[in-house]
Image: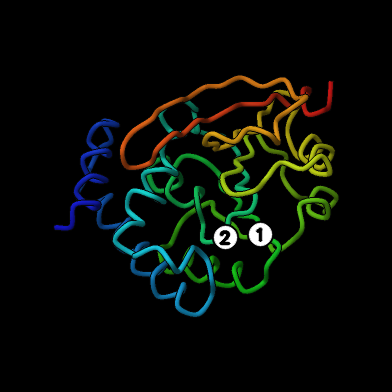
């Protein structure tokens, strides 16, 4: 077994998740689908070897599970790309409703095929700009919005506020660069530095605080 895959399996065990062999089977399926689709559509960096997906993408995506309660929550993965972090979180917390949002048609088509291939319940894919999706009729309101690979520009504040419930939060994956959060009130809810991922931080911004101060 490759080292990265073993590190990921050990991490699932550390999270005290049930049925690790079944869960690893699901992630192996996702890994194969992601590798296959990435040959045709640039879902994740092609400079990265697929063996590294286990830690750099799957484990990294699950860091939020350590500090955020996803059970029975309605979650939007903004700028999902290849389904990251939404699909890994959905696999370990099946009792959430997940919407994967991306504005690039090729990426959303690939995500739809992956979601269907894995038979993920209560998981949908939307092809739209965030600003347009916020005004779509009959779309859900969200308890949580995840942002792992998108810089938080000021033009996103209003649509994110509109998409979140009044009690909701934006959760952002950050490293050392926090420049896009200047002027915002936020709470750092996770911080870790290791040899593999480097510096990783997660911050939480309340719906009411998405405005410059």
Q: Residue 49 carries which label?
A: none
Say left or right for 20 vs 69.
Answer: left
Q: Which mark is residue 81?
A: 2
Q: Distance between the residues labelled 1 and 2?
A: 6 Å
Kindly give the residue lying farthest to the bottom in the view shown.
40
Label 1 Cα neighbours within 10 Å, binned few <14 / some 14-19 / many ≥20: many
Residue 103, image quadrant: bottom right
Say left or right for 193 vs 173.
Answer: left
Is residue 132 or residue 93 the one in the foreground? 132
Q: Are marks 1 and 2 in contact (CB under 8 Å)?
A: yes
The residue drawn where x is 84% and y is 44% is: 155
The residue drawn where x is 74% and y is 61% is: 128
Secondary element at image label 2: loop
* Relative image position of residue 40 (x, y in whole percent): 50, 80
| Label 1 vs 2, first from the N-terminus | 2
Residue to which mark 1 is pinned: 102
For the rendered model, the colour scheme is rainbow
The residue drawn where x is 59% and y is 72% is: 109
Quarter of the image containing the N terminus? bottom left
Residue 7, image quadrant: top left
* Relative image position of residue 49 (x, y in whole percent): 34, 65
């Amino acid at each position: 077994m490759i080292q990265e895959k073993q590190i990921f399996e050990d991490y699932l065990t550390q999270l005290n998740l049930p049925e690790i062999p079944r869960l690893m089977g699901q992630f192996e399926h996702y890994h194969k689908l992601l590798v296959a689709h990435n040959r045709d559509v640039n879902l994740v960096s092609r400079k990265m070897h697929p063996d590294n997906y286990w830690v750099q993408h799957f484990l990294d995506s699950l860091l939020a599970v350590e500090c955020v309660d996803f059970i029975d929550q309605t979650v939007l993965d903004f700028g999902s790309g290849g389904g990251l972090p939404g699909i890994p979180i959905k696999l370990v917390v099946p009792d959430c409703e997940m919407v994967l949002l991306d504005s690039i048609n090729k990426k959303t088509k690939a995500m739809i095929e992956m979601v269907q291939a894995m038979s993920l319940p209560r998981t949908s894919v939307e092809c739209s700009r965030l600003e347009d999706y916020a005004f779509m009729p009959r779309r859900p309101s969200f308890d949580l919005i995840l942002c792992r690979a998108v810089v938080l520009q000021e033009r996103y504040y209003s649509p994110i506020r509109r998409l979140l419930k009044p009690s909701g939060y934006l959760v952002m994956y950050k490293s050392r660069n926090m420049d896009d959060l200047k002027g915002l009130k936020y709470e750092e809810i996770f911080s870790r530095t290791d040899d593999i991922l480097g510096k990783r931080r997660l911050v939480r911004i309340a719906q009411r605080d998405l405005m410059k101060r």
